[in-house]
Amino acid sequence: MTRTKQQSAGFLDILKETISQFNMIQKKEAILIAVSGGPDSVALVRGLLLIKDEYELTFGIAHLNHELRGAESQRDQDFVKNLAQKLNLPFYLETRDIKSWSKEKGLSLEEAGRNARYEFFSQTACSHGFTKIATGHTRDDNAELVLMNLLRGAGLKGLSGIPPQRNNLFIRPMIHITRSQVMDFLDRQNQNFVVDSSNEDPAFLRNKIRNQLLPLLENDYNPEIRDCLNRTSQILSQENLFLEKHTSLAFKDVLKHRKDDLIELMLDQFNELHISMKQRMARKAIFTIKGDLRRITLRHIQDIIHLASTSETGKSLDLPGQIRVLKTRRFLCFRKEAIPLRDLDRSSH
């Protein structure tokens, strides 16, 4: 083993152990690596290249230019393109005006950027035959997200943090590696990277948590706070998976009718469920016809349960995303309407 390999063994050991633990990669797979140019994604590229021969892997690099930071965004794009050329890897680029797109979609800049990235990565992987998409999320990223979700108010899913893999497509091989281990690895590899200045902008809650709150908690309350948050997220993730499995089984028992835009649950059986299962069942019904749970709050879910158990037959609730929930004599009906609900009401008069 060379000196470089010896010095980076900690990083590589954790990387390989994580890949093995979650069965992330099979031999001879083609992996698209999402690279921003920052230290985490650059370390991911260099780390995966070191296990390339062991798994007989092929790689490509994908970069989305958000056009949010002017010359700095162009600098990042050029850096990633040059890195791909230096490593002789295919390079896939998309440029998108995230600021305009976020306004058009009514999303925050963070949410719009995340949606655009995952859409671009998924389309690129599909078009070019990649079987997995690797992102550079770290143990520190997970701790920050768990704390952020706790401050916002979240259930088990939000407090479960970043899943090591999702939909058998997205993988996070560095999810058990700390940011300090990333920096040490890059230093020993003599690998440079770029720094995103927006990571210091306190306008973003995640940055305030990373740069202000977590250091305060470490210094004044618990020096192991990041480990605690990660441990908690792993426990809650396992609990959530268990409950999701049982929700799916219970959903089949309560489901009476299902179409693309309609879910009908049997009312009496729904009302007999435990409150926790009712909440999960209502979310699952909405997700099934809406495709997401965006703007659906705990208050909406509580109102659905109240509608089912106490309201008169024929009463309904209107939810974000053109979702209407109607109570009939025997069923609790979730429907996604084709037109805005206010227009639907006008047309019925």
Image (cartoon, grey):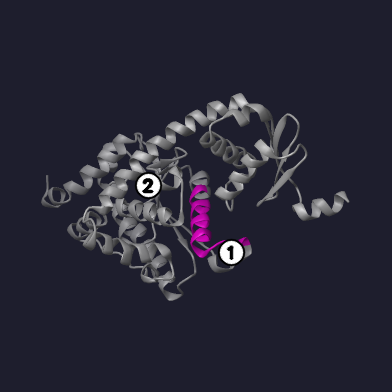
**Could you say which is closer to the camera, residue 328 or residue 263?**
328
Q: Residue 101: which disc?
A: 1
From the top left corner, tell me how far across and down residue 89 is, in percent.
37, 52
Total numbered labels: 2
Q: Residue furthest front?
A: 310
Magenta region includes residue 31: no
> Counting other residues with Cα less than 10 Å from the Cα at mark 1, is it few (<14), some (14-19), or many (20 or more)?
some
Describe residue 119's horizontal placement relative to residue 35 as left or right.
Answer: right
The mark closer to the camera, 1 or 2, is 1
Does residue 334 sit above or below 149 in this rendering?
above
Does residue 261 sit above or below 70 in this rendering?
above
Q: Is residue 88 among the parts visible in the rendering?
A: no
Q: Residue furthest top?
A: 253
From the top left corner, tell me how far across and down residue 329 is, in percent.
76, 31
Describe residue 232's horizontal placement relative to residue 167 as left or right.
Answer: left
Residue that mark 2 sits on = 59
From the top left corner, tell me how far across and down residue 169 is, in percent.
45, 41
Q: Kindly identify the amino acid type of the residue bearing the numbered disc 1.
A: Trp
Magenta residues, start to end:
105-122
Q: Quadrant of the N terminus?
A: top left
Does residue 251 sit above or below 103 in this rendering?
above
Name which residue lies at 24% across and 61% down. Answer: 191
Name which residue lies at 59% across and 44% down. Answer: 302
Disc 1, disc 2: CB below 8 Å?
Answer: no
Q: Does dot 2 land on a helix, a strand or a loop?
A: strand
**Could you say which is closer to the camera, residue 304 or residue 98?**
304
